[in-house]
Image (tube, grey):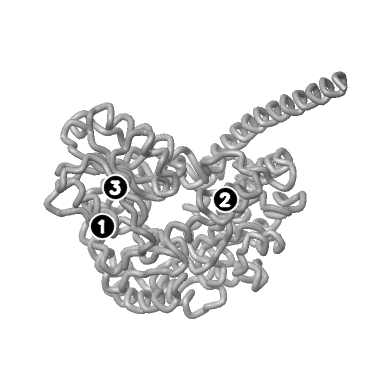
Amino acid sequence: MKVLLLYPVFPKSFWSFEKTIALLGRKAMLPPLSLVTVAAILPQTWEFQLVDRNIRQVTEAEWEWAELVILSGMIVQKEDLLAQIREAKRRGKKVAVGGPYPTALSHETKDAGADYLVLDEGEITLPLLVEAIERGDSQGVFRSGGEKPDVTSTPIPRYDLLDLDAYSEMSVQFSRGCPFQCEFCDIIVLYGRKPRTKSPTQLIAELERLYELGWRRSIFMVDDNFIGNKRNVKLLLRELKPWMEKHGYPFTFGTEASVDLAKDQELMDLMTACNFGAVFLGIETPDADSLALTQKYQNTRDPLSESVNKIIKSGLRIMAGFIIGFDGEKPGAGDRIVEFVQRTSIPTAIFSMLQALPDTALWHRLEKEGRMRGQSGNINQTTLMNFVPTRPLEEIAREYIKAFWTLYDPQNFLDRTYRHYRILGEAECHKIPKKKEKTYRKESNWTVIRALLIICWRQGVVRQTRWKFWPYLFSMYRHNRRGIPSYLSVCAQIEHFLEYRQIIKEQIELQLADFLAEEAKLQQSSVQEKATVEVAA
C-alpha cells in the first residue's frame, strides 16, 4: 500500500509565529507528530510519503503515486482538511481521516467524502483500518468503544519522514490524559482523566532516534498536562538526566503543565536538571469565581501570582493561556487579565475568547440551555464566541480587542520579557560547559547573526522600544549573559504579535459588525411583529 500522509494548513494563529521563525529560516513551528506516529503503527511493509502543507504543496507526482490518503488534524485546521479530502476524492483516491477534529465532528469529514473514519486513538483503531482494507472494504467507521490504549506499546514515530530543517521545534509525547475536570476542555473527552504514560526507556529511545537523525534543537513535550502523573514523570526525569549529561545536553525542552507544578519543588528541580526551560500554564483568568464555575479548582488553591513567581524562580520560563467570556464574569475582565499578566511579568500570554468545544461538559450544558450559536467550535483567536454569553457579546469582544492590543504593545512586551528574565532562576545544568559537536542541524552562524541584527534594528533603532532595548540588553549581559540567546528569542516574538494583533482587531470587529447588524434586524422584526399584533387587536 502506498500511503500519502497529508497534514492540513494552520490558519494564522497565536501559535503560528510565522514572522518569528522566518528569522531563522524555518517554515513551521512544530511537525505533525500525529502522522509520523500513524506511519509507525501501520504495517511497515507499506510505503509512506508525508507532506506537511504548512511547509509545501503536494506535487502531482505524489498525488499520482498514492493509493491511500490519510489526513489528521485539529478543529482549527478544519477548512484545509475538508478541502484536501475533496481534492483527493476528485483524483479518485481512497481517503482515511483521524485525529481530534474528525473524532469530534466526524459527520463533517464524512460529508466531505472521507471513506474511512479512523476515530479515537490510533493504537486501537488503525489495526481495524488495516483489517478492513485487507478484506477489501471500501469504507468504514472505526472506534475504540471507550477503550484507552496502553501507550507503552506505541512504537517510535517515523521522524525520518519529516523535513527536519523546516521546523523550529520537534514534537515528542510522553503522556495522554489529564486528571482535572475543567468544563471547557476537550482533552479529557478525547483522552480521559487517567493520565497514561510511556515508559522512561521508551521515551528515551525516541530521543535517541532524534539524536541519530541529527536533531540538536528544542523539543516540545506536547502532553496536555505533562505532570498529570507526577510519579511517572519523576521516574522519567531521573532516567533522562544521565542520558542528557552523557550526550552533552543536546536538547532543550518545553511542555504544558497545570499550575500545581508550583507545589512540587522536587519536580521543578528535576525538570530544570534535564534542561526543561519553558512551561505553558493554563491560568485562564485571575477571577476566582470564574475558575470555580468552570471547575478549574486546581487554580484556586494557592494565590496564582505566587505560584507563577515560584515557577519562574525555579528556572522555568512561563507561557500562559487566558480566556475571557466565562459565565457570570463581571465587566472589566480584559483589564484584569492585562493587569495580572503585567504584574506577574509573563511575556507570552495566549489570549482568546471562550469557545464551547464539541462534546465537552460546557458544550452539553449550553446545548441544554439553548445557548449555542454554532455547532462547530473554533479554537483560533479570531472567532467570536460560538454561544450566547451571560453578558453582552459586544462588551466581551471589545474588552478582548483592547486587552490583546495592550498586551502586545511592543514596549509592554519588552518590559515584561526583561523583568521575567531578571527573575528567572538559573538551573544547575545551564552552568555546566556544553560539549561542542558539529551537526548539520544547527543554524549557521550567518543565520543567527542575521536574525540578531534584524531584532536589534527593529527594536533597538526603528521602534520606540529603542530607549529601553539597549539598557535592558546591557543589564542582561551584566546579570544573566547565559540567558541572552533565550531572552532575544522571546523578544523576537513581538514580530509575530504586532501583525497578529492587527489581524485579531480587524477580524473580530468585522464579525462583531455582522453580529450587531443581525441583532438589529431581529429586533426590528420583533418590533414590527408586535406592532402588527397590536393593530390587529
Q: Where is residue 122 in the image (x, y as percent from the top left)?
A: 30, 55
Q: Earlier in the sequence, mark 3 or mark 2?
A: 3
Which one is nearer the viewer's eye here, 191 or 431? 191
Disc 1: which residue: 157
* Residue at left offset 57%, top offset 52%: 364
Q: Residue 363 carries which label?
A: 2
Tell me whether circle 1 and circle 3 mark residues in contact (CB < 8 Å).
no
Mark closer to the observer (1, 2): 2
- What amino acid type should be assigned to the residue bearing mark 1? Pro
* Residue at left offset 42%, top offset 41%: 77
Q: Residue 165 carries which label?
A: 3
* Rendered image quadrant of residue 229: bottom left
Q: Is residue 440 visible?
A: no
**Badge 3 element:** helix
Mark 1 to mark 2 CA distance (whole Å): 33 Å
**Looking at the image, residue 135 lies above or below residue 149:** above
* Residue at left offset 28%, top offset 59%: 123
**Badge 1 element:** loop
Mark 1 to mark 3 CA distance (whole Å): 17 Å
In the image, farthest residue toward the front: 537
Tell me whether circle 3 and circle 2 mark residues in contact (CB < 8 Å).
no
Q: Can residue 385 be seen in this view?
A: yes
Q: Position of residue 71 (x, y in %)?
A: 31, 43
